[in-house]
Amino acid sequence: MKLVSLHIYHFGGLKDCRITFENKGLQVLYGENEAGKTTLMDFIRCMFYGFPTKSQNQRRYEPKDGNRMGGKITVQHHVHGTWTIERIARSTVTGDVTVYDETGLQKEYSFLIQLLDGMEQSLYTGAFCFGLDGLQKLDKLSSEELGNFLLSTALSGDRDLLDIEQTFEKKQALLFKKAGKKPIINEKLEQLSSSAKSLQLLKEKNESYQTLTNEKAGQEKDLERIKQELTEIQTELFSNKRLLELKPVLQKYKQLDVEISSHDSESFHFPENGLLQYEEWRKEYSRLKSELAYTDSRIQNAEAELRSVISNEQIIMYENEIKRLFNYLPEYEHLFNQLQELQLHIHSLRNEESELYDEIGETWTEEELKDLSLSLSSLHLLEDLIKQHEQNEDKKTRLEGELEDSRIKLERLEAEEAKQKANLLSEEEYATYQHSNHNQTRKLPFYTTLLPIISSVLLMWSGWISNHSLVMFGGVLLLIISLVLSVLYLKKNQSGEEMPKHVHHRLLEDEVKRKQWLELSLQLSNENNIYVQLAKRLDYLEVEEASVWDHAKRWASDNGYKGNLDRLFVSGYMKRVLQLKSLLRQRNEAEKKAQDIAVKQSNYEEKASSLSLSWGEEFQEDTKSWINSCYAELEKQLKNQSRVEHLQQNKNELNEQKDELEKKISFIDDQIRSLWDVAKVSNEADFYVKGKNKERFGKLIEERETLYNQLISLGFSKDEIVVMAEKVTVNYDTTLHHISILEEQVQEKQKRYDEKVEAKGKLDWELTKLLEDGSYSENLHRYEMLKEEWNTLVKKWASLRLAQHALSKVKEDYQKTKLPAVLETSSVYFSKITESEYQSIAFTDKNELMVVKDGIGFYPHELSRGTAEQVYLAIRLAVAYHAGPRDFPILMDDIAVNFDGARTKRTLQLIQEAAIDRQVLFFTCHKHIASTVPSVPVIHWPHQSVTAEM
């Protein structure tokens, strides 16, 4: 089965998202953190197996906006074809699922199991859909637990098998243990044995039961009567003792009542909260008096400060002019600094002009430089003339050298030619030798006469062999002609005269020398032509040079150049003339700017001098210092003026505040007099005395009311409180005597009650001994019930025992058959990841996982986290290869984050190899993963609609 595409309607934070997948192979799905990669993996799982219920320990992706979660996923099955699985959270908890094909044909839910090739969710989440959290579980397990965990994963995809096996053991232990007491079957067995023994004893305990029952009833009636009498006496004793406990309160209540009755009614004539009001008015009066004295002192200080301020009104009259000059002072300083910089610049320009004049070697006047007008086209034309001149000079130098070389070579060849010519035969000698040589017939070798004869014989033989008469006839004719010519040739050679050998040698020697002379003559003629051509080219070059000079003169006339014409062709000459012209322009501009600055400075100084004359202040030569001093004085006077205004305003405010304080003091004085009038006193001492008395009377009332409320809260009425107060004060001795009598009665009654209780206890004990095991029929019924429960528990324990035995057999069979293949495949995968650093993965006899490196075994907890996770990944891939369908897609969520670069690359190459015939979706938030396997398609997430890209 392969994933074709998916469409997320609503799932967690994802909404209306579409993805199209490649048909097979490794595909990288890249997205940043919190982009929804894990959500996407859970969406695929939920489409296959349903949404998790609320009771399951899995995250539910219900959308926050209230929409129903759901979506669809299209898969392609190698047998059933292309189908779409659509699941929406509606009526059922796991979601309503619809399975339909491209034509709209729908199938039942059972068909979905066929599409998934019968794969259970545990195997899917264990070997086909896992992430980093699954890899990091290894750090929390011991070696034995890790071995069991991986073995369980190989069998069922997760820890289900191990959990089932442990569950069987726990349930059996809860039911029965050989030497145990707490298990249920052990307890039931003890109860059954005890019940059987008690059945025998019950027959002997029924004779004295009725007698003891009647005696017990009489004892209970006596106990009830004595208990009632004892309770009445104890209640009365408790009430009297409670009086003693409340004695301080009741005595205080009685004392307060007597003191309140003794107060005169005249003391009630006092204002409510009079002392508190009086104290507050006195505090306010004292505060206002202090504030009034402080205000007077501040008014005096303000008047003294006003008198001390000295004001110069004349300088304030010229405030605007001084500020204007002061604000322009930075500009003045800037002009001063700028003038100095310009003077230095002008001096520097003059130095540069002098240096340029020295380099040029002639002096140019300013008028000549101004008349020199050079445009870009004229400079370009001058550059062309300079290039032509330099090229002509180069050509001239080269041609003159070549011409001199040709002249030397020509002279040498002429000398050699004359010398060679002198060694030749004279005309007369050559004619004589030539005549002798003309009469001589050249002899040919003998074999030349045999060649035609041999050829004719071969031709005749060829015609005879091939039965071709024409060829044979041609051979005969050729033979006849050859014989005739040979005879004639031999006769001619015999009749010829022999030429002397020295004549022949001399002619050959002269012929060789004549050839050498002819060669030298040709070389001489050729070199002469070269010399003439070089001379002509040199003449043409002088014409071109003259033309260049004419153009240079015309250029100098057109552009106002009045210098030496030869210097125009000096490299860099005109560039320095232009620099000189630029320096002259810069110097003129700088000098003009310096004049303007000097004028501005002069104007500013004239304004400052005019201001000093206007208000009679002596002007200083240092304009800056004078302006600064004037501005400082102005600032001082402005501050004095502002301070005078502020002091005057402050004085007015203080006077207003003083009037307000005096009014408040008068009002408070009236309020104090009013309190005295209400209290009917004329001075402060009498007011305080009367106020204290009133305050004490109020406290007595409040204290008595508090005690009264406490006694009421204890359940006493007003009349009972009065009587109780009399008992603990006036009749205290009588109350003590009555309490002692009640205590004696309580002791007597308690003694009789204890005797009756002891007698009743003996009867209860005897009856309990008779009835502690119940009746015979009840114990028989209980015995049968215990026996039935015991049989049921034994059957349940036996079924668990058989199931565990069957599970052990399945586990043992798997270890002998499929597990070796899984371990072999995982060993190959792990070796590839570590580049053969580790050779294999195996289980020990104790069912503990180990990896082998150079013959040495290592437990997972002895490995680094990354290496242990690589072991886990290798086993997961091996389980997926052996346990599930070969083409079922695998989903991995950033399982290589703890791997180094080299192992990450090898891991991805291994996954790519495993993904030849199946889909593998690799979810990651690391960009370098895509570059590690550049040929793998990359799906960029989260776009609402994404497709795989190369």
Image: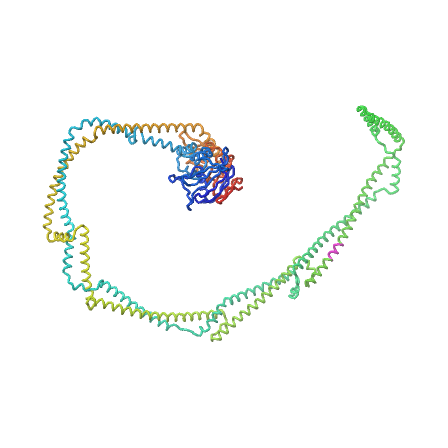
Label count reads: 0
Q: On the picture, is 767 further left or further right than 174?
A: left
Which of the pair 516/801 is nearer the observer?
801
Q: Residue 71 appears at what percent x and percent y? A: 46, 41
> Magenta stretch?
539-546
Q: In this rendering, is residue 792 above or below 949?
A: above
Q: Quadrant of residue 814?
A: top left
Left or right: residue 534 versus residue 364 is right
User: Which image quarter holds the C terminus?
Assistant: top right
Hey, which quadrant is residue 641 in on the image? Answer: bottom left
Extreme residue toward the right, this view = 495
Q: Is residue 519 visible?
A: yes
Determine whether 378 is above or below 34 in the image.
below
Nearer to the camera, 918 or 146: 918
> Where residue 115 appears, x then y in whole percent?
47, 34
Q: Quadrant of residue 433?
A: top right
| Scheme of colours in the image | rainbow
Does the segment drawn in magenta span residue 408? Answer: no
Depth check: 418 or 870 in front?
A: 870
Q: Position of residue 933 (x, y in %)?
A: 52, 40
Which of 933/618 is in front?
933
Q: What predominant SS class does the magenta segment belong to? A: helix
- How far across and down, in percent of the image, does residue 758 sit? 14, 36
Q: Is residue 540 magenta?
A: yes
Residue 865 appears in view? no
